[in-house]
Image (cartoon, rainbow, N blue to C red):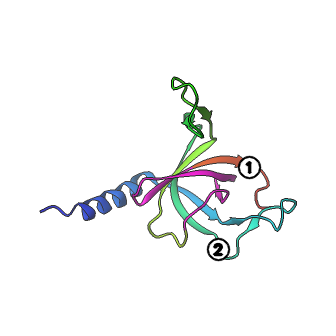
Amino acid sequence: MVDWAAARAFTEHACSGIFDLTPCRLVGMRTGQSVNHPEAEDPGRPPFDFLGSIDLQPPPRTMMRALPSDPGTTGGIVSYDAVLSARMTEWPWRPVKRDVVLSGGKSWRIETIDRDGSDRATCYLMEVRHALG
């Protein structure tokens, strides 16, 4: 009998060794004390380094924020600057929206995260300037 969970774990580990070659750093962010205060690093989630895959200029995504009155329409188109894919099994904490990814001298803010139940997640990113002061 095939152990499908073990086969899936092996495949995810093997694929991450092939595709996740870009050095990245994840920085947890927290909101300011009020809307007038800037975001700051979250001391409860220390930054850490990891390897991931960053693809620039991914194709736009159609996102349904609400059901349209016309069933023939598809909803708004949302574009992101980059998409990050990485195996998150051994990460000390999971990223959330508005956390910052540093890679290649650029800062990227996580705008949304897709999780499919596997050990990998996909983060849609927007490039930001002066993300950390």
Up the image or down, 43 lies above or below 97; here it is: below
Disc 2 residue type (three-letter): Pro
Which disc is residue 46 wearing? Answer: 2
Q: Residue at x 73, y 49 (%)?
A: 128
Tally of marks? 2
Work out how far the residue at label 1 is from the one at label 2, CA to CA, in angstroms.
20 Å
Q: Quadrant of the C terminus?
A: bottom right
Position in image of residue 9 (x %, y %): 32, 62
Q: Residue at x 54, y 29 (%)?
A: 74
Q: Which residue is mark 1?
A: 128
Residue at x 59%, y 37% (from the top left corner)? 57
Q: Looking at the picture, how far across and down is residue 28, in whole percent?
A: 66, 66
Residue count near mark 1 (Cα–Cα under 10 Å), binned few <14, some 14–19, many ≥20: some
Q: Which residues are magenta?
A: 94-123
Say what secondary structure mark 1 lies in: strand
- Asked whether 77 or 95 is in front, the reply is 77
Q: Is residue 35 magenta?
A: no
Please tell me which residue lies in front, 16 or 122: 122
Q: Is residue 53 above or below residue 73?
A: below
- Position of residue 24 measured from the top left corner of the image (x, y, whole percent): 59, 59
Res 118 → quadrant: bottom left
Identify whether 123 is placed above or below 77.
below
Judged from this view, the residue extending furthest toward the left is 1
